[in-house]
Amino acid sequence: MNEKFEHLIERAEQLIRRIESILPQPLSAPDWQASIAWRYRKRSSGHGALEPVRHVAAMRLDDLKEIDGQKEKIQRNTLQFVEGKPANNVLLTGARGTGKSSLIKACLNAYAPRGLRLIEVDKDDLIDLPDIVDTVSARPEKFIVFCDDLSFEDGEPGYKALKSILDGSVAAATPNVLIYATSNRRHLLPEHMKDNLTYTTSAEGEIHPGEVVEEKISLSERFGLWVSFYPFSQDEYLTIVAQWLSSFGVAVPAIEAARAEALVWALERGSRSGRVAYQFARDYAGTHAR
């Protein structure tokens, strides 16, 4: 009888361990000395983890040209944050490939020696944002939660989680966490022609947005700082090409000679973005390397 009872207990313990292995677990703190940047990843089991980024992009603020106004705003806000002064959550919007993500990475590298850290979170995992914030809230470092290429479709769960963290939760904002997000959409949600039908006009001629429009702009309004990026002109594009070629060790005469090829490269891709300039510089430097 005792043997059967012990066997039953053993089977029950095995079953409990299996159940526990598939249940969501509290987010555990990583080794904070392993990196200056982490990615939040959720496994198929539903367990989330902060994984260190072993090779952080070596982007410098001086590498980024023709976005001086945007750079000044982001750098100032980030410095205030690192120094423990009031600072804003930031939404960077505009043309693709114009340096939005690169600027955030450059700020991380610039201020990492002063305690700045970064956690990259995919849109689909924003529902776990409260757990991430709780995990770092007692740390002495300053954390930027980075959401790249952010946009939502109607009804996605991460939308409300982000909205609550930014402004609207009963919990006070955590002073060592800011949200930096990039997006090609100013209001982060798709805008449809039918939304314009919800606008109303008062007797005095004032225009009032309806509830649908109010909901779509309410998330972006929770970011205290908006920074817009615009397509580059031809001269600006060539300046960026020259900067990247110089960083790859290409001599000045060769940089001048590469201008025509750089324009053809941009024409073939239908874009004069900073990303296209960087890609051309890598190709040219590699092709002409001795």
Image (spheres, helix red, strand yellow):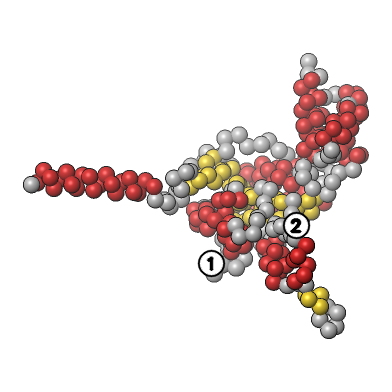
Query: What is the quadrant of residue 228 in the picture?
Result: bottom right
- Mark 1 crowd level (few <14, some 14–19, many ≥20, 10 Å Cα): few
Nearer the viewer's eye, disc 2 or disc 1? Answer: 2
The CA distance from mark 2 to mark 1 is 27 Å
Q: Which of 32 and 92 is in front in this view?
A: 92
**Crowding at mark 2 (Cα within 10 Å: few <14, some 14-19, many 20+):** some
Query: Label 1 sits on what residue type?
Result: Ala
Q: Give x and y (percent) for residue 138.
A: 50, 56
Q: Is residue 159 left or right of residue 183?
A: left
- Circle 1 residue: 171
- Residue at position x 75%, y 71% in the image: 198
Residue at left offset 80%, top offset 30%: 280
Relative placement, left or right, of 199 versus 115 is right
**Which type of secondary structure does the marked residue at label 2 adopt?**
loop
Residue sitting farthest toward the left = 1
Please, what secondary structure does the residue beneath circle 1 have? loop
Q: Which of 11 and 220 is in front in this view?
A: 11
Quick check: can you spot residue 279?
yes
The answer to whether residue 225 is visible is no
Q: Is residue 47 above or below residue 193?
A: above
Q: In this view, does 189 lie above or below 239?
A: below
User: Is disc 2 in contact with disc 1, using a CB cutoff of under 8 Å?
Assistant: no
Residue 273 position within the rendered picture, expressed as x and y whole percent measured from the top left: 81, 40
Q: Residue at x 67, y 58 (%)?
A: 89
Q: Quadrant of the C terminus?
A: top right
Q: Which residue does the numbered mark 2 point to in the structure image?
A: 186
Measured as percent of width and height from the top left, residue 20 is found at: 35, 49
Residue 1 picture location, percent across and down: 8, 47
For marks 2 and 1 on the same chain, the one whose residue lies earlier in the sequence: 1
- Name of the residue lying farthest toward the bottom: 203
Amino acid at the residue labelled 2: Arg
Residue at (91% x, 25% y) in the render: 257
